[in-house]
Each structure stands twice: as C-alpha cells, then as structure tokens.
Image (tube, helix red, strand yellow):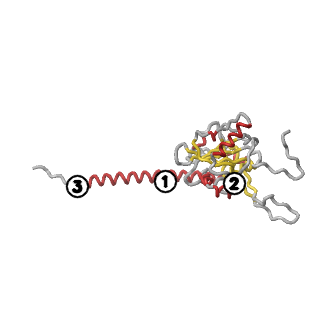
Amino acid sequence: MKERRHPKRKTNVISNTILVFAVGIFLFSAYKLYTIYDEYNKGDKEYQSIIEDVVSIEEPKETTDTEEEDSEGNAVFQVDFDKLQSINKEVVGWIRFENPSKISYPIVQAEDNDKYLKTTVEGKKNGAGSIFMDANNTADFSDRNTFIYGHNMKNGSMFGQLRKYKSYDFYKENPYFYIYTPSGEEIKYQIYAVSIVEDTSESYNKYYTNDDDYLNYLKYIKSISRYDTGVEVTAQSQLVSLSTCTNVTETQRLLVHGVRVAEPVAEGQVEETGE
C-alpha cells in the first residue's frame, strides 16, 4: 500500500523555507545598513576631531568709541595649517560655508582623482572619502576654474548639503562660501550658477585657450543654471566649482560654481590694474 502524501506538510516546508530566506535577507540588509552608517559615523567623528584640533573661532570683541571692530563684526575663523599638514602634507586648503555649516572641511589634492574617493584626510579607508581638489588644478587656487569634489553622503556630511542649492530661496539666503589657504588667505566666493549635469558635461572643462573661450564657458554654465543669480563675471573672474553626485543615476552630478569676490579697495589706496 502506497504512503499518502500530505499536501499541508509540503506547504509548511515551502513556507518555512521562504520565511528562513526572507529572514536571511532582512538580517543581511540590516548588517549592510549598520556597516554603512557605522562608516559614516567614523568619518564624521574623524573630521569633527580634526576641526576641534586645528580650527579656532575668535568672536568679535566688544568695542568702545575709540576702537574699531572687524569690518562686519563677524567671528574670525582660523585654521592651523601647520598642524593640519603634519597630519597630511597633501592638504591645500579649507572650505567653509556659514550655512550649511556642516560643510567645513580640509581640502586635499593627490596626483590623481581616485585616491581620496574612499580615503580620509588621516589616510583611513572610508566611503566618505575626503573633499579634494582636481589633480590637474594649481594648488593655490590661482586657476581660472578650480574643481573641488566631495561625496553626497546620505547623512548629509561631506558635500551632501550642496543639494540645498537646488532651491533659489536657499541660495538667496546663503550666496557665499569661503576658502582658506596655507598662505593665510581667506577667499570669499559668491555662487554664480547651479546645475545638474552629466559627468561628461562641458561644465567640467577647465582648459581655455583665450579670454573669449573662457567667457563662452561662463555663458554656457549660466545658460544651464537652475536659476539666474544675477552675478556679473568677466574674463578675469576666477571660479571654484564644487561637484558632487546626485544619487539619482551613476553619471549625474550637481555642480555649484562660485566666483571669487574681489577684495574692496581700501580708502586712500589706488586699485591695481596690472598695467
């Protein structure tokens, strides 16, 4: 006599197998999320530690009628580059936004654009990487267009906060950022254009044969900007272009172009024309 099969038992086996498989996927996904956010936290802690170690902010002093304070009454932001370059000799500057204040990082530059994609300023392997200057740019920010790259991290670190500049209203409230250099410069930049482009876009061109070529480039990035900032530029204007991914496609990028703000001429001084 043949043994009768029990359909219900067979169904239970299949259900249990599916359940075990689903639990396995859940546990694996949870582990991956934990490792990602643990890496984020380690990166954040490293950069916060660097800030605490090398950055000082001197609040403006209260003044009397016979004293002068800082021209705008602002706190003075300073970076100890000697200490910072003892940590990493490839540090070439520091970038800071007043808002989003989370963007305040050292800038490094290597011989290629791969090294700092997943390496921190302290040389540790981390998906957050570093904020880094294009390997082909001049380290002192003297080029017509200096490119600086950073990841768009899901926790908003690195260049993750640049996404806020998709909004014209946010730009209007926060049109400036600052670069500090080892030579002691504080360079102010006003945002000129903001665009979402492919990584092969002409926006990444950094070589210009003459003034007309450069002016055409400036017109181009203005023409594809998400909004018109109204900022005027000339052939003598110098840009810093901040680049990050959008996390929409592998090849899509967000570019925020800032133009160097000319230093005001002090009263009684004659502006240099280069002639």
Q: Residue furthest right?
A: 268
Q: How many tags in the picture?
A: 3
Image spot of residue 86 (x, y percent): 69, 45
Q: Which residue is mark 1?
A: 34
Q: Residue at 72% of width from left, 55% of height from top? A: 56
- Real-space Cα distance between discs 1 and 3? 37 Å
Q: Which residue is mark 3?
A: 9
Decide: few, some or many residues near mark 3? Use Cα within 10 Å; few <14, some 14-19, many ≥20.
Answer: few
Q: Quadrant of the C terminus?
A: top right
For mark 2, give the secondary structure: loop
Residue 67: quarter of image: bottom right
For mark 3, give the secondary structure: helix
Is 246 placed above or below 112 here? below
Residue type of the residue flagged with mark 2 = Pro
Task: Indicate which label's residue lies in the foreground, 2 or 1.
Answer: 2
Q: Residue at 33% of width from left, 54% of height from top? A: 19
Image spot of residue 43 (x, y percent): 58, 51
Q: Is residue 134 left or right of residue 186?
A: left
Q: Which mark is residue 175?
A: 2
